[in-house]
Image: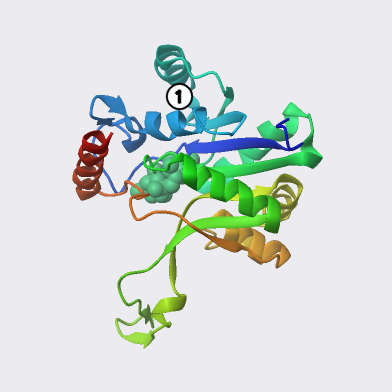
Amino acid sequence: MQADGIRTVAIVLAAGKGKRMGGDVQKQYMLLDGLPLLYYSLKTFEESQVQEIILVTGANEIEYCKNELIGRYGFKKISAVVAGGAERYHSVYEGLKALERSGAFLEHTYVLIHDGARPFIDAEIVDRAIEDAVEYDACVIGMPVKDTIKVADGNGFAKMTPERSNTWMIQTPQAFFYPLIKNAYDKLMERESYQRGITDDAMALEKMTGHPVRLTWGSYENIKVTTPEDIEIADAILRRRKRVK
Ligand code: CTP
Ligand code: MG
């Protein structure tokens, strides 16, 4: 446990297929400046106050991750590499179960669930996520949107326009008091009908428990690499980061 009596664990998700990116290599293993995309967020967690990392990947990539990521780059905090599932929430659940198996201090544990496809988190984001998780039990990293957002009616017309100052885009990590999120996911997994449309962890919590979720400041660089043009944006962010270092 940390000096303040809490245990902090990151679950990093890398079990997706990357369909929107296309290509032969899954996006989490594509090279950014010579290093696999997944390396960057693992490195940030490794150097952060987080104590442990659980990596969730495809069943066929577990060996690759153990040898080519953990072995090659010497990550010390990765305590487990487990296989994910068909949807993101399945992969999260596998990560939570791996944490449950680890057994220790679960009543003092805070978990940060992070998309491995977001390479540009930084130590400050991790610190803010932990701080707000400890204070509010549930928080998501995000940023106010810059564009006006319209909700569509399903027929190609705008149905309504949320007030921009109250509209955020949601990123990861999403951080929770472990027993709270485990309970929400246990319930979510009971019925398929609960799982429809669940795209992030806060939604699982809101839907299954109604517990409020704090919005915590992230960064506009904390993009999710999703489609091919995001690779160019990611390269530009990396180049800038190298210049300012
Ligand atoms: N993810 C996962 N397990 C899944 C689906 C997604 O661990 N079954 C992870 C991805 O690896 C990614 C993160 O969740 O780090 C966010 O998902 P997304 O950006 O949608 O990635 P993919 O599902 O891989 O991409 P796509 O939806 O285009 O296929
Ligand atoms: Mg996906």
Q: Nearer the viewer, residue 26 or 66?
A: 66
Q: How is the image coloured?
A: rainbow
| Residue for point 33% across, 85% down | 158
Q: Residue at x 61, y 28 (%)?
A: 52
Q: Is residue 137 visible?
A: no
Q: Which amino acid type corresponds to the residue marked 1 in the rendered image? A: Asn
User: Disc 1 on helix, strand or loop?
Assistant: helix
Whole-percent x and y of residue 97? 69, 36
Q: Position of residue 216 (x, y in %)?
A: 53, 59
Quadrant in which the C terminus is drawn: top left
Q: Residue at x 73, y 38 (%)?
A: 6
Residue 38, compared with residue 161, is above or below; it is: above
As drawn, is 63 to the left or to the right of 21? right
Q: Is residue 94 left or right of residue 217?
A: right
Q: Report x, y in % for residue 115.
A: 46, 43
- Quadrant of the snapshot with the N terminus: top right
Residue wearing tag 1: 60
Q: Nearer the viewer, residue 62 or 126?
A: 126
Q: Nearer the viewer, residue 45 or 192?
A: 45
Residue at image coords 62%, 54%: 132
Q: Is residue 230 left or right of residue 88?
A: left
The answer to which image quadrant residue 157 occupies is bottom left
Closest to the observer: 79 or 51?
Answer: 51
Query: Is residue 243 among what the camera can see?
Result: yes
